[in-house]
Image: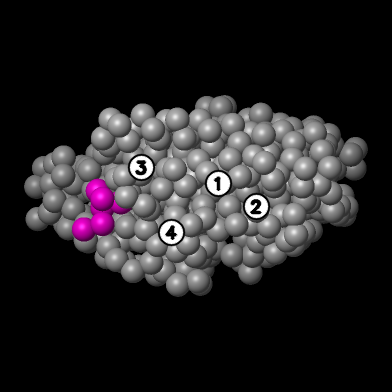
Amino acid sequence: MTFGAGSIRIDVTVSRALACCVEIKSNRPQGLARLFVGRRPEEAPVLAGQVFSLCGVAQSVAARLAVLNAADLPMRGEERFAATAKLLAERIFETLRALILHWPLPLPAAIVALAGKYLREALAASQAIIAGAKAKIAKCAFVAEPAARLSAAAAALGIPDGEGQPPRDTAYAAILGNIDRDRIFVSRRPNPLTVADDAEVIAHLSREAGYASLPYLAGRVVETGAYARLSSAGMPEGPHLAERFLARINDVRLCLQQLSNLDQQDTDACSSLMGGGPTPGAGGYGAVECARGRLYHLAEIGMDGHLCAYRILAPTEWNFHPAGPFVETLLSSRIGVGESAARSVSRLATLFDPCVAFEIGVREAAYA
């Protein structure tokens, strides 16, 4: 985010090397949605793309869907095609970028230098697709060539052609080597946030002012993102950190396949990436599956034709909820003490991938 992104503070208390207490505090600004109130509906997608630097395309598309549904208007074919291309390009690059730039352990210098080169190539290809979509270039003409470049850059970073592990001597193989024997965290099957939950989520979001900062679904520890999305297709087997990492790798691979199939008018890609509908009141919502998970925008249009209410619910609020999946995974894990514990917590947090920076504090129970 570019507008006061804030951060997350993770404080862990250990007793006999076990994580016995986890506290998460966020200083993320909660008033960003108020920036949309009073504006014309057509301004919302532009504003969303300007306010949020991370996943700005996803934010803009979610806003567009929200205001269209609030006005009871459809997103037509060409616009849906362009939005699908943009969302896939952004999701691919953002995942590639975050896995490299946010990894908390040092990688070999030669690997880092090559990774920087391939990330720049991936960024240029992703931006070319997004620019082509914004310019409303004829269908498919703006996708094929930059999609091939994006796929080549991803492969050079270590995204495999099929299911499996990153090829040797790539950046992602080096990262996997840091964690493929780490069994500190017990594997847990996620309880994924899906389109089937939208009606309940939107009902809460419409009527509860604080829901966007502390979302919940009764009786569930909800998770969203690549690891949750792939749970229905069978999870990777192995140490938990490696499972999470490989889920992110596989998500990129699947998105690259969807991008290459857009010339076949792949409607499945569109429906899996975005949706929306009316709200219980006089409004509408948009939902988008971005790199970090399911993102919601909710809009209501007043009698004067301007936005009179707006809500945004980001994936991070589910995954780093004080009683959410990150905390559940961390509690009772034998993380050690001191720097060793902080390193373990940092790797887990990185693979849950918050959309803001995080800080970690570790203390022993005897000194709490």
Q: Residue at x 16, y 40 (%)?
A: 339
Assess whether mark 1 and mark 3 are in contact (beta carbons under 8 angstroms). Answer: no
Residue 204 picture location, percent across and down: 63, 59
- Pointer 4 and pointer 3: residues touching (CB < 8 Å)? no
Disc 1 from disc 2: Cα separation? 10 Å
Q: Which amino acid type corresponds to the residue marked 2 in the rendered image?
A: Leu
- Residue 151: numbered disc: 1
Q: Nearer the viewer, residue 186 or 70?
A: 186
> Quadrant of the image for the N terminus?
top right
- Amino acid at circle 1: Ser
Q: Which residues are magenta?
A: 176-181
Residue 62 in the figure: left or right of residue 20: right
Query: In the image, is residue 255 part of the stretch drawn in magenta?
Result: no
Looking at the image, is mark 1 or mark 2 nearer the viewer?
A: 1
Residue to which mark 3 is pinned: 171
Q: Quadrant of residue 193?
A: bottom right
Three-letter amino acid code at disc 3? Ala
Give the mark nearest the N terminus, 1 or 4. Answer: 1
Mark pair 4, 3: CA separation? 16 Å
Q: Which residue is mark 4?
A: 247
Q: CA distance from mark 3 to mark 1?
A: 15 Å
Dot 4 amino acid type: Ala
Where is residue 161 drawn, in percent x and y?
48, 57
Q: Position of residue 80 (x, y in %)?
A: 78, 51
Q: Residue at x 62, y 60 (%)?
A: 201
Task: Say which mark, if any, is on residue 259.
Answer: 2
**Among numbered discs 3 and 1, the one appearing first in the sequence:** 1
